[in-house]
Image (cartoon, rainbow, N blue to C red):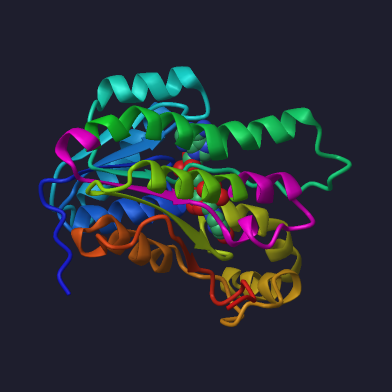
């Protein structure tokens, strides 16, 4: 199976590190012209430079913009008016008990995890309709199905991503545009490394082991019993972004290590 994305422009939000960077790298290696996005100018430019040295087949651009705000999304769209592939990856997760999570926490998760994707989908889908081809991928989470008790606000935002993706797929019915959500399980990104830093310092164990302990303790239904690598998530996203995945739309695709315990 050959995945060739030459001539396609792909925007991956929140792609200076973590899952987003791995997705950007896979898409670039498949030949796409890739736009890297993060909030800081310096970090975004550095990530784009790094990507150029990692086998990018097409061009690599950097656009710093905070996609959690309407202004940030507008600025991004002004700089990159058309994309063929939109990966709504930018997201935050903050473990916090329901009774500690105030309105500000809920609103921040909603703006970063949901509204960024809503605004950018609204901005880019008409251009995809003009060329009758496009791919929109929401990076949701298994937490959208298995609402985590330690961060209900996060789970709800990811359920919303899955719902928006399903609705948009139907809205694009009969076109060459597909819209899907991808549901990673615990994945060893920079964000998760930061979340596990304290435990790592306490135990002195390698990060993979600390992550596997976390999975066994807090996500016991995981079949693989370990965290995924960012590349394992990027592999599925790259397939979905390709012309090969033309009959997959409106789907919530799991790359969760078997964690969601339903058929
Ligand atoms: P991460 O924290 O390692 O990286 C997040 C990236 O998003 C960073 O580049 C950060 O700069 C960027 N970002 C954050 N807010 C932004 C904003 N407002 N505007 C622009 N960029 C912004 O995160 P990750 O673990 O790689 O997660 C990526 C996505 O995958 C998120 O949507 C997350 O919810 C989802 N996810 C992660 C896991 C996991 O275990 N890592 C599991 C399921 C789903």
Residue sitting at x 28%, y 47%: 50
In this orientation, which residue lies closer to the viewer: 120 or 211?
120
Q: Quadrant of the C terminus?
A: bottom right
Residue sitting at x 38%, y 19%: 74
In this orientation, which residue lies closer to the viewer: 15 or 48?
15
**Residue 91: image x %, image y %?**
54, 43
In this orientation, which residue lies closer to the viewer: 36 or 209?
36
**Residue 111: image x %, image y %?**
58, 31
**Residue lying furthest right:** 99
In the image, residue 136 lies in the stretch drawn in magenta = yes
Q: Quadrant of the N terminus?
A: bottom left
**Residue lying furthest left:** 7
Magenta residues? 129-158
**Residue 28: image x %, image y %?**
22, 52
Residue sitting at x 35%, y 27%: 123
| Residue 257 location, quadrant | bottom right
């Amino acid at each position: 199976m050959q995945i060739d994305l030459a001539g396609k422009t792909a925007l991956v939000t929140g792609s200076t590190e973590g899952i987003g960077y791995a997705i950007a790298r896979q898409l670039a290696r498949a030949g796409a012209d890739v736009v890297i996005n993060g909030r800081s100018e310096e970090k975004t430019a550095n990530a784009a430079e790094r990507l150029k040295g990692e086998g990018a087949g097409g061009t690599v651009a950097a656009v710093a913009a905070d996609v959690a705000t309407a202004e940030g999304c507008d600025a991004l769209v002004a700089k990159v008016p058309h994309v063929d592939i939109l990966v709504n990856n930018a997201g935050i997760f903050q473990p916090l008990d329901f009774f500690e999570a105030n309105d500000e926490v809920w609103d921040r998760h909603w703006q970063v995890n949901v509204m960024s994707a809503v605004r950018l989908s609204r901005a880019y889908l008409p251009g995809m309709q003009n060329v009758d081809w496009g791919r929109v991928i929401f990076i949701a989470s298994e937490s959208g199905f298995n609402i985590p008790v330690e961060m209900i606000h996060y789970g709800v935002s990811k359920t919303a991503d899955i719902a928006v993706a399903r609705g948009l797929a139907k809205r694009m019915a009969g076109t060459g545009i597909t819209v899907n959500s991808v549901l990673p399980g615990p994945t060893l990104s920079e964000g998760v490394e930061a979340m596990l830093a304290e435990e790592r310092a306490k135990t002195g164990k390698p990060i993979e082991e600390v992550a596997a302990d976390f999975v066994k303790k807090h996500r016991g239904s995981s079949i693989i019993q370990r965290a995924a690598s960012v590349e394992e998530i990027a592999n599925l996203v790259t397939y979905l972004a390709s012309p090969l995945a033309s009959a997959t739309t409106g789907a919530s695709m799991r790359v969760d290590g078997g964690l969601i315990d339903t058929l």
